[in-house]
């Protein structure tokens, strides 16, 4: 069923419509294909941290509801999360990365090289973010905690060892 709104005739259709703005509706929002495509490259263009948090939550719920492939979610995270500056949202998304990695193992991703590719990218992103947020202690701590929780490579474990024995320092 359609509802005609005379005041909107002749106006451009918005690029993105979100029915739960400001989280007042207390509903689970599914993301249509058009909105999902827009979020893949533009989630950080939403200036409101609550809105970004809700959108990230909706993306993760889409994975859990089998409406978004785990690898597609991982691609969105890899492309966007390094730019997240809100502490709460960053913690929220990095916790889903830990779950994503667990799912890669739990579901025994048939192509182990693909699994390793994602694990390596997540680890590299976390370490790079630890280094790039040197002037932002809280963000750097979140990224460092995340790095510790997902590190798996010999190189990454070696970095942790050199940190523990004092041969490497994080600025």
Image (spheres, rainbow, N blue to C red):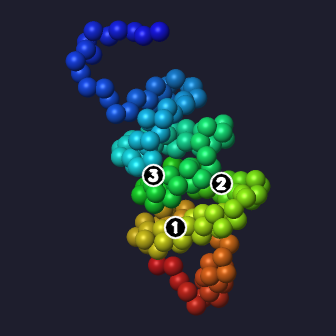
Rendered location of residue 6, percent (x, y): 27, 9
Rendered location of residue 49, percent (x, y): 43, 44
- Residue at coordinates 44% horizontally, 68% vertically from top-left? 133
Element type at mark 3: loop
Marks 3 and 2, how far apart at CA:
21 Å
**Given the current orientation, which residue lies at the most extreme front position?**
111
Q: Do the residues labelled 1 and 3 touch (CB within 8 Å)?
A: no
- Residue at coordinates 48% horizontally, 68% vertically from top-left? 129
Residue 32 visible in image: yes
Numbered badge on residue 100: 2
Closest to the observer, 48 or 37: 37
Marks 1 and 3, how far apart at CA:
17 Å
**Given the current orientation, which residue lies at the most extreme bottom position?**
167
Question: Given this view, does label 1 or label 3 mark the residue nearer the observer?
Answer: 1
Left or right? Give the position of 171 relative to 72. Answer: left
Rendered location of residue 26, percent (x, y): 56, 26
| Residue placed under numbered mark 3 in the picture | 86
Question: Given this view, does label 3 or label 2 mark the residue nearer the observer?
Answer: 2
- Residue at coordinates 55% horizontally, 62% vertically from top-left? 142
| Residue placed under numbered mark 1 in the picture | 125
* Mark 1 or mark 3, earlier in chain: 3
**Given the current orientation, which residue lies at the most extreme left position?**
10
Q: Do the residues labelled 1 and 2 touch (CB within 8 Å)?
A: no
Closest to the observer, 24 or 152: 152
């Amino acid at each position: 069923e359609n509802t005609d709104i005379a005041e909107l005739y002749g106006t451009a259709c918005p690029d993105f419509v979100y029915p739960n703005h400001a989280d007042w509706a207390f509903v689970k929002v599914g993301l249509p294909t058009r909105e999902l495509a827009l979020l893949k490259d533009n989630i950080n263009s939403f200036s409101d941290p609550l809105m970004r948090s809700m959108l990230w939550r909706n993306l993760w719920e889409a994975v859990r509801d089998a409406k978004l492939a785990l690898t597609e979610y991982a691609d969105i995270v890899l492309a966007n999360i390094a730019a997240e500056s809100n502490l709460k949202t960053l913690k929220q998304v990095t916790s889903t990365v830990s779950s994503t990695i667990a799912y890669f193992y739990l579901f025994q991703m048939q192509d182990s090289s693909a699994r390793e590719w994602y694990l390596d990218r997540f680890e590299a992103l976390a370490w790079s973010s630890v280094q790039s947020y040197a002037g932002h202690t809280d963000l750097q701590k979140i990224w460092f905690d995340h790095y510790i929780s997902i590190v798996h490579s010999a190189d990454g474990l070696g970095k942790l060892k050199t940190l523990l024995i004092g041969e490497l320092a994080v600025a």
